[in-house]
Image (cartoon, coloured by chain):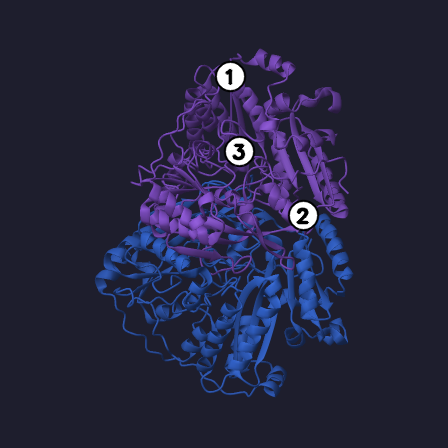
Chain colours: A blue, B purple
Amino acid sequence: MTEHSQPEIATALQPEMPPTRWGDPAQAADLPEGVRSLVGTVFPLRDTSVCLDVALPPARLGTDHVAGLAMIVGEEHVRADDVTRRLRTRGKSTPDLLRQRGGDLGDAPDVVVRPGGHDEVAAVLDFAQEHRLAVVPFGGGTAVTGGLVADPDAAGLAGVVSLDLGRMRRLLAIDTVSSTATLEPGLRGPEAEALLAEHSLMLGHFPQSFEYASIGGFAATRSSGQSSAGYGRFDTMVVGLRVATPVGEVRLGSAPANAAGPDLRQVFLGSEGAFGVITEVTVRVRPRPAVKRYEGWRWQSFTAGAAAMRALAQSDLMPTVLRLSDEAETAINLADPESIGEDSAQGALMIVGYEGSVAAVDAKQAVVTATLQSLGGTPLGSAPGERWAEGRFNAPYLRDSLLDVGVLVETLETATFWSNRDNLYVRVKAALEESLGEGTMVLCHISHVYPTGCSLYFTVAAPGGEDPLARWLPAKTAACEAIVAAGASITHHHAVGTDHKPYLTAEIGVVGAEVLRAVKRTLDPVGILNPGVLVP
Amino acid sequence: MTEHSQPEIATALQPEMPPTRWGDPAQAADLPEGVRSLVGTVFPLRDTSVCLDVALPPARLGTDHVAGLAMIVGEEHVRADDVTRRLRTRGKSTPDLLRQRGGDLGDAPDVVVRPGGHDEVAAVLDFAQEHRLAVVPFGGGTAVTGGLVADPDAAGLAGVVSLDLGRMRRLLAIDTVSSTATLEPGLRGPEAEALLAEHSLMLGHFPQSFEYASIGGFAATRSSGQSSAGYGRFDTMVVGLRVATPVGEVRLGSAPANAAGPDLRQVFLGSEGAFGVITEVTVRVRPRPAVKRYEGWRWQSFTAGAAAMRALAQSDLMPTVLRLSDEAETAINLADPESIGEDSAQGALMIVGYEGSVAAVDAKQAVVTATLQSLGGTPLGSAPGERWAEGRFNAPYLRDSLLDVGVLVETLETATFWSNRDNLYVRVKAALEESLGEGTMVLCHISHVYPTGCSLYFTVAAPGGEDPLARWLPAKTAACEAIVAAGASITHHHAVGTDHKPYLTAEIGVVGAEVLRAVKRTLDPVGILNPGVLVP
């Protein structure tokens, strides 16, 4: 019943990602010659190379460690070979990729352990605590803020276990009356959707990393997806959690909401493996939508489009998808004179998507359309929406292709209240442009809106020079400092990891940081859980 | 523009509540003779008396303590007289009222201190920590779960300071772009609404205690109001908090939502004065609704009505108010043959309310009406809705009148997932009936619904006998044990206090309780904050 030839989201299991690139190796491609020429008019192109014959640091674990872990999960699920260790080294930020391309595997885990369920996770934690081994939970491996980079030395630990949750991929329970499903953390987005689809249900969480990211990762990082306007952030979908910690199990979720003290679910959501390993997630599910309609709207400016988004959000009148590119992103990414008219790359392009029953979509679309028209928006029809939907998960492939030709590309994001949106936008953009210098392109979009505020997602492209990593790191610092100076959040949906940790205390205060340390000490007294991540 | 003669919610400051009763003394009334006769056919009536000449325990604080506190807040804002101490003794549960009626003031604070703002709160906490004094934050005084009953002896403290927030009643900031307002904690519901109304704005939080309860109390107890279907729980309205703790200030709220680690706002929401004193609350506000329409629907049974609520919630098709009485509550409270037809007291009565712009209300009402009709509901028109709206804050007055004639009346509430609703309902009802014996009347309604579940709110009436308190306490224990056995939440919107503390560990687990203790130790190392409340 899908209208307008919207492609269904693929739900087949994706192949393992290579260490130096995003996604399915079969989809990796050089830039088409035409695009390469176009890029070359903007950025100096350089040949780059990937260091293939890399030396891993010697594994720090002894055979007794490996044997002990094998006793718990089975010999075939403990791997200490170089290929596996390299595949579990860091995540998929541009610095992560650049380090892998350069052969820097200094953060490689010593061993990769694949538990089969909650009890094996708990047993691995006991073993790791006894033997003072760091444990880094690994879900989809899509982390972009250094959440997979543990520091065993700082914690005085003997080595690093990558706790690969890839065997924990079951739909454990489904409650069609309550509309909930209990999922294991290793399920990737498409797999979870495929299991739910067998019951004609859907989760509806579609971040850009959807094809690879995992249910456990969504929970541990407070992820937010492209349909957050309609279906909410991942943390709002979660009604229950089971967590293995070194001091015992935690089960939360007695009701959708309650007043039984602080909501401890919200302490484990966003805990990034530092407080425990999330072994079960109970989420709200929904009927699969009968129709999906995505369309484009043009606004005179980013500011005008943002005002329209604010008006929708404050009227509690939200479509399922609501995104707005600034003028630069509109011009660069979204121009398509053929399909949507000559001036389509002018102003600011908004994507508005509706999903649900025909009747509900018709009704919502009518009201939203009237509102957007009254606010001065120009409807562009379905072509821009379909283009967006087709390419919604593809940006990381383009990043690889650009890194290949020496262009530095990275993204970062933040959130604030509406009255601070423009100030935040101007400051972050200026910080990035100033740090990276001439020839830098900073694009921005709003992809998550609330009645009181929104996120800002920046894409940066700049000449990579001889050492793109050395160029990026100070730019990221400058952007983070601008975010802090603007009083905004250091991250809307990508977590703290190690990259944002220096800025967290500014956001939650000295006492707030002390609360995190107290929780950490209580749940992880030896400090084995993702040491160095999250907790200031 | 209000339609259907809906009374506006009064926003004038209510007078101080007397210690032995709810609400405005001018509204206290004996049961009308006709009602008294009717009640007499069901329950044995008894003369009751209120002990007026009560002896307070001697104040444990020395003149140096009083002088020190007066240095901080001013002499006129420190009161240790018997009248003031009695007014700040406990809250408004039936046990609280029965103890006050019986002259038991064993939990009286030693002194009442009224700070003028955040800095004075912080200074009082410093002083209290130095002198080992318990501090019990006091907002509206409407607590019903023992949240105002501190235990200074258990914590080895020298006495109890009631920290009366009644001077902190300012609207500190308003951001009309972001639709947020920053409120001081001592503002009662009607005052906060009156201040916002000057800007044509509204908060929209209307619990039954609305006329007396305070903004700080709403936050500290995770309150939920009668319009939660449309406007959400109080915790979902909060975007920022400022909290004074003995170890320093906490300010949270960098954005509507973020991924910067655990959401620490959710640790202070529901913290019941045990982690700090909430001194500022930034909330989402909304335009005042142009129209309010409340109407009645009849369902064949409580089960059929609950199924309809579930259908609405799972379609994200929520009116502003959505309530459903079970057959017993429908028969007792809502029968009105004159206005709504002879069989109106049969089946289960649902109240459905719509608030907003005319266009939005028209649209929502049309869709909800069609859905409810398709599910088998019978529309009863606006009369039952108007009756409900007129009496929405009055039940506590009726409780007083019934206590006066020897009838034991109390309420309790819980929440669970939809698939467990009937099991929870049956178990709690049976536990109350069994404990209180013949002649007990147990009424129930659902007043808060979610896609995945709902609350259940029970009203119990039974012969009070010679010692109604001695009859109630075991019944409450039996109900709590039934809730725990059903795997539900010990409280949906009334907090833990001291009454629910014995059941909290069953709900959040041993490790969850340890997390609360760790946060408590960190923020309140001496243990002065509401000792004995919340933390297991």
Q: Tag 1: residue type?
A: Gly
Q: Tag 3: residue type?
A: Arg
Residue A298 position, x and y percent, is: 73, 68
Does residue B380 lie above or below B139 as drawn? above
Q: Tag 2: residue type?
A: Ala
Are both tags, 3 and 2, on one chain?
A: yes
In percent of the image, x 58 and y 35: which residue is there?
Answer: B15
First along the sequence among labels 1 and 2: 2
The tag on residue B313 is none
Does residue B532 lie above or below B42 as drawn? below
List the residue tagged with mark 2.
B197
Secondary structure category for the residue under label 1: loop
Q: Front-most of B408 and B161?
A: B161
Measured Cα–Cα span from mark 3 to mark 2: 38 Å
Residue A191 position, x and y percent, is: 51, 56
Secondary structure category for the residue under label 3: helix
Q: Quadrant of residue A455?
A: bottom right
Residue B65 shows up from this direction:
yes
Protein chain holding label 3: B
Does residue B474 lie above or below B46 as drawn? below
Does residue B152 lie above or below B236 as drawn? above
Residue A163 position, x and y percent, is: 36, 60
Measured Cα–Cα span from mark 1 to mark 2: 42 Å
Tell me the quadrant of the picture where the C terminus of chain B can be found. top left
Badge nearest the viewer, 1 or 2: 2
Q: Front-most of B139 and A496?
A: B139
Q: Front-most of B8 and B28?
A: B28
List the residue tagged with mark 3.
B421
